[in-house]
Image (cartoon, rainbow, N blue to C red):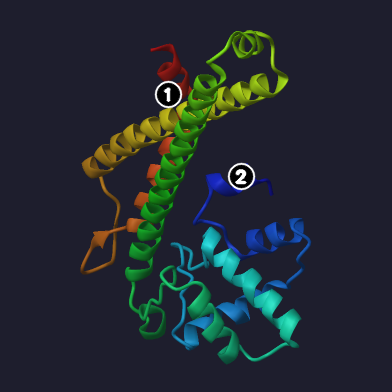
Amino acid sequence: MSEMDFQKWDGFLTIGSVREKLMDEGITIPTPTIRNWVNELQELKVHTIPRNARQERVFSKNDIEIIKFIYQAKKRFGNPNMDGIAAMIQEKFAGSLNYDPSEESGEEGVSFALMEQRLKESIRTEVEQLYGLREEVKKELADLTNFKRNMEGNYEKQVQLLMPNPEEEKKARAVETRTAILNERSAERRVRQRLQQQAEDLWKQNPQKKGIIFKSEDMAAKIMFVQAYIDERLEDEMKKEYES
């Protein structure tokens, strides 16, 4: 599984896909072992892996990092019990853990809300990363401007400034590349937001319901509908974005 595939389905990887991804990284963990670790974290009220409409566990990037942390802790400390590892997890992953008591009581719906929350958190993280990349580009541009000003002062330095400088050309290409990446990601984020709004508007016209007596909106179906809508139209909309 490539990193691009993982980013596309972030928050919706089943346990089998998680095992495959870990194997790509040189980590072999049997599927039953992963399932047992997840159940132990739930029993200890530390962290919950939510389920989709088929009652399959679905993992985010953060969930996979927790699985890797358990694997490394057991390998490093001689296979300690989960109680000790759970305490380390609560310290290392503080602020990113989600415990869902509905997994204990059998309630429905809360896990789907948790999935939607994770999707929002993923989008927020991507926006923060884009902002950080923009700040890095701004800093490099400022450094380049300051460098040029420092070069001004005498004739010899002005001549050196006009002559081709491999290092400066390398820096300029790096800045151009990062700027292009930033523009592309910003454009994709705008298109995704526009498509998400369109999909949600369509969903509202005929939302799927679940339940026999008390019907409620099927949040899992909504999330899958919105994701499929975006995936089917993203390439064409990106072309239109660049042509406009």
Mark 1 or mark 2, which has the lower sequence index?
Answer: 2
Which quadrant would residue 83 be assigned to in this image? bottom right
- In the image, what residue type sits under mark 1? Glu
User: Measured from the top left, where is residue 23 in percent x and y?
Assistant: 75, 61
In this rendering, position of residue 108 left or right of residue 161? left
List the residue tagged with mark 2: 5
Labels 1 and 2 touching (C-beta < 8 A): no
User: Measured from the top left, where is residue 151 in percent x and y?
Assistant: 57, 19
The residue lying toward the viewer, choosing from 136 and 228, is 136
Q: Is residue 223 visible?
A: yes
List the residue tagged with mark 1: 237
Q: How many marks?
A: 2
Residue 176's place in the image compared with 14, above or below, is above
Q: Residue at x 65, y 69 (%)?
A: 68
Residue 216's place in the image compared with 76, above or below, is above
Q: Residue at x 30, y 34 (%)?
A: 198
**Label placed on residue 212:** none
Q: Is residue 32 visible?
A: no
User: Which element type, helix, strand or loop, lies under badge 1?
Assistant: helix
User: Measured from the top left, where is residue 167 in percent x and y?
Assistant: 69, 24
The residue lying toward the viewer, choosing from 145 and 96, is 145
Q: Residue at x 43, y 12 (%)?
A: 243
User: Which element type, helix, strand or loop, lies under badge 2?
Assistant: helix
